[in-house]
Structure formats: structure tokens, C-alpha cells
């Protein structure tokens, strides 16, 4: 199974990227493509720029989605919404193919330093991503990242660790059931 993984952040110290990397440890026997949104930096979307054509990076982003079987992502929350970096990639890609996520099964996550764990961006994505071709099979939000996550060992709170492990297994079971059909 080919996995596309990314954090919806352009930060070199992204906590969402750390969460994705932690979850990917449960998928080590699969082919993993962990991408960095910085590799898809484009001009800020506008219809005026669009008239001149689409940036290669937008096509490249859609291609990595096309080439995967499942998507694992964790969205950064900036001012209760997507990060500007993710929103711009998403905007450009959606103008080429409105079904950006191309009906791929998705494990959707978020985390933040606060107690809501990126819940606002998670709720927005749960509402809108399916309209853009995401088949969200499981979601997970990690609150208080710096209290609940250790950079070496991952999630340290036993109840939260149990929750994410159950969600990963549920996601794997759903994806395996899809492969069998």
C-alpha cells in the first residue's frame, strides 16, 4: 500500500509533522511518501495569476495524491482555520481538480499547543474535505501537544495513546476491507 503523508504546515518545527511521523511508525511495512508543503510553494492564488496558467507545483501535488492509496495528514490550525501554506496549495490544486483528494481514504488529524487540539480546523476539514474527494475514515485530534507528546517517544499520555492506536487499527481495518473488494 502506498501512503501519502503530510502536515498542513510549512513550519520547519511543525508539531503536526511530528504527529504524522509518530503515526507512520504503525505503517512501516508500507511504502511511505512523507512530503513537505514547502516543496509546493506557489504564488498566492488569484484568478489573475490563474489566467497565466497553473504552477507546476499544483500539478505535482495532485500527482502525489494520484500515486497513493491512502492519505495520512495532520492539519495545523492558524487563527481557527487552515495554515496559509496548506490553503494555498489546496486552492491551486482544487482549481485543476475539484476532487483534490481523488477519493482516497484518509486518516485526518490535527494537534495544537492548546486544549482544543486544532479542533476548529479539524471540524472545518471534516465538513469540506469530503466535497473535495476525501474519504475520511478516521479522525484524531491531539490536545496540548507539548504536555502530551515527547519528541523521542511520541504520545506519552496513556489514555490518548490508547485512543490513537485504536483509531489507527480501525483505519487499517477499513482500508484493508477496501483493498479486498
Image: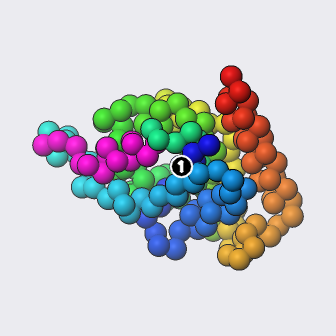
x and y, in percent, of residue 133 in the image: 49, 31
- Tell me which residue sits at (31%, 36%) in the image: 95
Number of numbered markers: 1
Of residues 52 and 116, the one nearer the viewer is 52
Q: Classify 18 as above or below 139.
A: below
Instruction: Name the image colouring.
Output: rainbow
Answer whether residue 80 is visible to the viewer in this image: no
Magenta stretch prevailing secondary structure: helix
> Residue at label 1?
4
Q: Quadrant of the N terminus?
A: top right
Of residues 117 and 9, the one nearer the viewer is 9
Task: Give the residues drawn in magenta, as a range.
Answer: 52-65
Q: Quadrant of the C terminus?
A: top right
State yes or no: residue 33 in magenta. no
x and y, in percent, of residue 126 in the image: 59, 39
Position of residue 170 in the picture relative to residue 17 (left or right): right
Q: Classify 37 as above or below 67.
A: below
x and y, in percent, of residue 72 in the image: 59, 49
- Quarter of the rendering containing residue 63: top left
Q: Classify 29 as above or below 157.
A: above
Answer whether residue 104 is visible to the viewer in this image: yes
Instruction: Pick out the residue farthest to the top.
Output: 181
Is the residue marked by circle 1 packed among few (<14), some (14-19), or many (20+) residues within 10 Å?
Answer: many
Of helix, strand and loop, which one carries label 1?
Answer: strand
- Tell me which residue sits at (42%, 59%) in the image: 37
Position of residue 92 in the picture relative to residue 107 (left or right): left
- Quarter of the rendering containing residue 17: bottom right
- Tell me which residue sits at (43%, 64%) in the image: 10
Q: Classify 114 as above or below 53.
A: below
Position of residue 93 in the picture relative to residue 155 (left or right): left
State yes or no: residue 62 in magenta. yes
x and y, in percent, of residue 139 in the image: 68, 45
Amino acid at each position: 500500500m502506498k501512503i501519502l503523508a503530510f502536515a498542513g504546515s510549512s513550519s520547519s518545527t511543525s508539531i503536526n509533522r511530528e504527529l504524522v511521523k509518530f503515526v507512520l511508525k504503525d505503517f512501516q511495512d508500507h511504502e511511505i511518501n512523507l512530503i513537505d508543503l514547502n516543496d509546493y510553494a506557489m504564488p498566492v492564488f488569484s484568478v489573475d495569476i490563474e489566467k497565466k496558467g497553473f504552477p507546476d507545483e499544483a500539478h505535482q501535488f495532485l500527482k502525489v495524491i494520484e500515486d497513493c492509496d491512502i492519505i495520512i495528514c495532520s492539519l495545523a490550525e492558524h487563527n481557527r482555520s487552515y495554515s496559509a501554506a496548506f490553503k494555498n496549495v489546496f486552492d491551486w490544486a482544487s482549481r485543476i481538480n475539484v476532487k483534490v483528494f481523488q477519493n482516497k481514504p484518509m486518516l485526518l488529524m490535527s494537534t495544537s499547543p492548546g486544549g482544543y487540539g486544532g479542533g476548529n480546523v479539524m471540524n472545518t476539514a471534516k465538513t469540506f474535505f469530503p466535497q473535495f474527494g476525501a474519504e475520511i475514515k478516521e479522525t484524531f485530534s491531539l490536545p496540548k501537544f507539548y504536555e502530551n507528546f515527547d519528541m523521542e517517544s511520541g504520545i506519552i499520555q496513556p489514555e490518548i495513546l490508547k485512543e490513537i492506536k485504536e483509531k489507527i487499527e480501525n483505519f487499517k481495518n477499513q482500508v484493508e476491507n477496501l483493498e479486498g473488494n
